[in-house]
Amino acid sequence: EVGEITEAFNVMSTKLKNEQNRTKEFMEDFSHEIKTPLTLVKNYNQALMDKMIQSPEEQQKCYHLIDREMNRMQKLIQNFLDFTKLDAESVELVKHPIVLAQTVEDVMSKYELLFKENKVKLDMKLDYDVIISADEDRLEQIIQNIVHNAIKYSKEDPYIRMILERNDTSCVLTISDNGVGISEEHLAIITNRFVRVNKVRSRKEGGTGLGLSIVEKLMDLHEGKMVIESQLGVGTTVKLEFPILVD
Ligand code: ADP
């Protein structure tokens, strides 16, 4: 019996140590990510306070840069908190029957202006009979993150194709783009937190490296799964599979 208790204790303490290491690693990653915008804000602000920037135009530019970095920090903190809660499984979804095609349409209409600005061609083929059990806000968040990536990492003549099909027990929403693509080596780790292949581009577009990690966790909570296929220089296809409510 003593042997059994000792073993159980050892298993527990290893588990706890792994958990502590994970938390420590996550905190280190987060501190590293927040350091750049924080340092930039501090430097721009110092320059303004020391009156090192004289012309009103240059001062205005500085205020804009501070604002951009503050927005970046805000998004990083929001995503970080969301990811932490999802990781700790302390998020409860409020699920209802939802016509998935309708939610896709609603999300895409929010992007209309951005599509126009970026000259994105959109092609949708959606099955309106598909009903899934989902948390509407979280479902929108999933689609938004994937669609936003398709725009962020696009090339010339961008297009996005969205197809929603069903089979007996599940449905698949396929979102394809003809953007920069992801190499095989990076594809394997792309859903890990804070992984950003194209750091400069991700930073420029306000990326946090947490979007796909959040989507993966949200798909789990919907008993679904995400599969990403990609070819460098050709484009990316994200397949989101959900169980359907069969009537
Ligand atoms: P980020 O906030 O940096 O966009 P994500 O977790 O959403 O973070 O994505 C992680 C990385 O995966 C991105 O930095 C980018 O390099 C790559 N990526 C994601 N979606 C696409 C896509 N559609 N095309 C090319 N690269 C992508």
Image (cartoon, grey):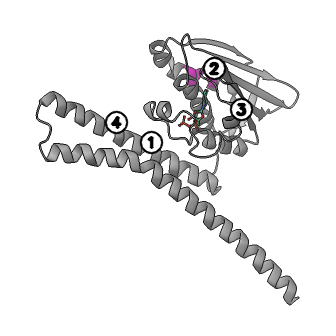
**Depth order, front residue of 208/114:** 208
Q: Quadrant of residue 101?
A: top right
Residue at disc 3, CB closer than 8 Å to ligand 1: no
The residue under label 1 is 75
Residue shown at the point (44%, 42%) measured from the top left:
75
Q: Circle 2 — which element?
A: loop
- Say left or right for 70 vs 61: right
Q: State how far apart marks 2 and 4 are (Cα).
A: 29 Å
Crowding near pointer 1: few (<14 within 10 Å), some, many (20+)?
A: some
Kindly report which numbered mark, 1 or 3, lies closer to the viewer in this rendering: 3
User: Who is closer to the viewer here, 4 or 111?
Assistant: 4
Question: Residue 199 location, x and y as percent?
Answer: 51, 36
Mark 2 vs mark 1: in front = 2
Q: Residue at x 63, y 25 (%)?
A: 181
Label 2, on which residue? 233
Few, some or many residues within 10 Å of mark 3 (<14, 14–19, 20+): few
User: Quick one: quadrant of the N terminus?
Assistant: bottom right
Which percent across, then down, holds residue 29? 52, 53
Dot 4 or dot 3, earlier in sequence: 4
Q: Quadrant of residue 244?
A: top right
Residue type at mark 1 is: Lys
Q: Mark 4 falls on what kind of element?
A: helix
The picture quadrant for ligand 1 comes to top right
Taking 40 as reference, is 24 left or right?
Answer: right
Q: Is residue 120 above or below residue 90?
A: above
C-alpha distance separating marks 1 and 4:
11 Å
Which residues are the magenta region?
Answer: 104-108
Asked if residue 161 is among those painted magenta in the image, a careful observer would answer no
